[in-house]
Amino acid sequence: MSPRKVRLVANLLSGMPAEKAIIQLENMTKISAGPMLKLLRSAIANAKHNYEMKEEGLKITKIIVNDGPILRRWMPRAMGRATPIRKRSSHIEITLEGDAPEKKKNSAIEN
């Protein structure tokens, strides 16, 4: 999907709490909302599993949509000509912020 189409959805979600962003994406009619929803759920799962954060406190701080590789194809046209077709893709980077729990100190090592 072209980055321009994905940025339309990404700009709406920037600065939004993660729970509200999920609701927004589920009710959106843009085609790019599906992959963005999948990415957001993956980011939330990573935050919960890897950093032990709570889903309620997560907020989207930054979403970056960059160009990905472009597949170049050709379409035959009249009088033997060919017209280029560029099938664009995009790379999406999402950053979540929340309160991470402090790690417990092991008192057995300190004694």
Image: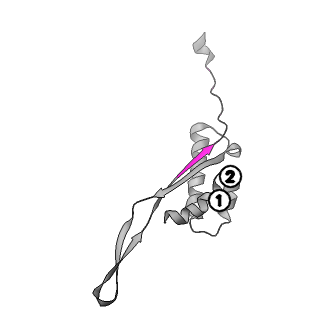
Label 2, secondary structure: give it: loop
The kind of secondary structure element at disc 1 is helix
Type of the residue with mark 1: Leu
Q: Main secondary structure of the magenta part?
A: loop
Q: Position of residue 100 (x, y in %)?
A: 64, 35
Residue plotted at (54% across, 66% down): 5
In magenta stretch: residue 96 = yes
Indicate left or right for 99 with 92 as reference. Answer: right
Q: Position of residue 35 (x, y in %)?
A: 55, 61
* Mark 2 residue crowding within 10 angstroms, few (<14) / some (14–19) / many (20+): some
**Residue 105 image point, x, y percent:** 62, 21
* Residue at image coords 59%, 58%: 10
Q: Residues within 10 Å of mark 1 (few under 14, many from 20)?
A: few
User: Image height check: is 38 above or below 109?
Assistant: below
User: Which residue position holds label 1?
Assistant: 12
Observer-nearest of 109 and 71: 71
Q: Quadrant of residue 7?
A: bottom right
From mark 2 to mark 1, how far is it between C-alphas?
Answer: 8 Å
Q: Is residue 85 above or below residue 17?
A: below
Magenta range is 93-105
Quick check: marks 2 and 1 in contact, CB under 8 Å? Answer: yes
Q: What residue did someone put label 2 on? A: 16
Q: Is residue 102 above or below residue 25?
A: above
Is-magenta flag for residue 62?
no
